Image (cartoon, helix red, strand yellow):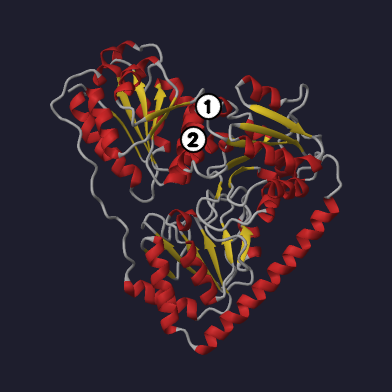
Amino acid sequence: MRGRTVLMERLVAQGVRFIFGNPGTTESPLLDSLPAYPQIEYVMALHESVAVGAASFYAQASGECPVVNLHVAPGLGNAMGSLYNAFKANSPMVVTAGQQDTRLRLANPLLGHDLVAMAEPVTKWSVQVERADEIAPILRRAFKVATDAPQGPVFVALPIDVMEQETDIGPTTPDALWRAARPDPAGVDALATLLLRAVRPAIVAGDDVARSRAHAELVTLAEAIGAPVWFEGLRHHASFPTGHPSYRQSLPPDAAQVRRMLSDSDLVLLLGGPFFEDVWFAQGSHFPDGAKIAQIEETPERLAFNHRLDAGLVGAMKPSLAALVDAIHAKASPDFSRGALGRNSALAAQRDAERQAYKARLEKSWRREPTSMPRAMAELRKGLPENVVIVDESITASLDLARAFDFSGFGDYFSGRGGGIGQGLAGALGVKLAMPDRPVVAVSGDGSAMYSIQALWSAAHHDLPIVFVILANRQYRILKHNVDVWRGAFAVASQHPYQNMDLTGPDLDFVKLAAGMGVEGLRIDNADDIAPALRKAVAANRPYLVEVSIEGKR
């Protein structure tokens, strides 16, 4: 059996449905094998970063471990930004790249480099197959490592000559693994006792809550203890229903602001995340003085890694939250339950006041020209169906998008981790492949869109009915905001105009760009036209781009 046959047979046994890739010469053995395996579809991208970005979001939306196939050193280099984002997002993937013939190793061949060293910093495991006998055991380990918690990408280099070697070691079937660890009952009891002593508890929910489909358990816990629920600043999912009275918002990007947001809390419970990924340095803790800190994680690696804990628990998120709820219900006194009801009532009143304040903000900005961000997001909500899936890279419009939409459960919302831009358009490809029966809308800033604009071609090529909404303010608005923060943080006296942050001269024309890649599009300059345009785009049931002109920052 040839090495490439071992590879393909293992992918079939693993249940791999998609290989995301950009082809090259050293990938010829894999590409030539595809016709014999029609159960695996090759999702073609015109740039390696798009392939990895689509695979990462597919992994998040499907819960599966997809395969990516890149092209030697430059191709892997092109993918590094997206691979970093996938690593930070804990997206399980097996990323492969063709490698030059091993017999050329000492001859410095064209496109040759140490691929293992390149990929190692942004993967859980990086390895090169040196002979065909290694393909089966390396693939078995690659899928295991990628899907072990915390999940993440694994890299495997596949030399072209090794893929054509003969081997007697055939593909193995996938391991039957049950890895959802039950929490220690003593730890559950200790954590419940700590929560029951709190007067003003708060919860910060990470992506693992959503990935484990533990929304209902978290809602029950939040209501049982009367706690507000916050999200991490950068997140891939909405881990709590955003229309619930206990939902607050995403936490800001530095310790001082986080501490301010949590200032009323005497206990903070952290659930399933890195906690915290700051953008700016600020003195002091993320938590108020004297507050107790507790944490639940699915692996010891994250538990107490950044913060000292008063109680820490390792366990699969869904059963851990369920066990904690049961313990609280069993131990709660009538006084505690009455206190929780009072806190829930206060949170509902606070949420109602926030809605009224946002309504006033929306009304104040309703007639601004170009269209204000609040108005644009309100019109998006008006024009899209209730079951829409939002892939969000709106960046400076994200707070308004969060106010306009209610995300109730897993699959309603996807965004990006890592902070690298260009994830939205590419990610929408993977989300649509994972969720073909729901309308998928990618909302992206114009600057971010240009990092992965080739995704439009892939959507057309594979006939993926995605609506791409480009919010065009012709600038990197987030960078302008960050310049203002930098000037304040470092007492920078200069007040020069923002440097190299405007996307003008010439202006970008996304409708023409889309047309050049086979995607129909239209540009909206009048806010009244946004909702009708979106209804038309969704009804078209094919790839469609809507460019919306919105306000910028001067």
Q: Name the residue located 26 percent from the left edge and 28 percent from the top edge.
A: 7
81 or 175, which lies in front?
Answer: 175
Question: How many neighbours does mark 2 have within 10 angstroms: few (below 14), some (14-19), or many (20 or more)?
Answer: many
Find residue 190 and report its image quarter.
Answer: bottom left
Q: Cβ–Cβ below 8 Å for labels 2 and 1?
A: yes
Question: How many neighbours does mark 1 have within 10 angstroms: few (below 14), some (14-19), or many (20 or more)?
Answer: many
Amino acid type, residue under disc 1 in the picture: Ser
Which numbered mark, 2 or 1, is in the foreground of this view? 1
Can the viewer see residue 490? no
Q: Is residue 361 above or below residue 117?
A: below
Residue 459 horizontal/vertical position (percent): 54, 29
Secondary structure of residue under mark 2: helix
Secondary structure of residue under mark 1: helix
Q: Name the residue located 32 percent from the left edge and 73 percent from the top edge.
A: 185
Q: Image quadrant for the N terminus?
A: top left
Q: In the displayed image of the protein, which residue is found farthest to the front?
A: 539
Q: Name the residue located 41 percent from the left edge and 36 percent from the top edge.
A: 121
Q: Image quadrant for the C terminus?
A: top right
Is 282 left, or right, of 436 in this rendering?
Answer: right
Label 2 sits on residue? 54
Is 554 left, or right, of 432 in this rendering?
Answer: right
305 or 327, which lies in front?
Answer: 327
296 or 368, which lies in front?
Answer: 368
Can the viewer see residue 104? yes
Find residue 514 and report its image quarter.
Answer: top right
Mark 2 or mark 1: whose residue is earlier in sequence: 2
Q: Name the residue located 33 percent from the left edge and 21 percent from the top edge.
A: 35
Label 1 sits on residue? 458
Residue 177 horizontal/vertical position (percent): 25, 51
Residue 152 horizontal/vertical position (percent): 40, 43
Question: What is the C-alpha distance between the residues marked 2 and 1?
Answer: 10 Å
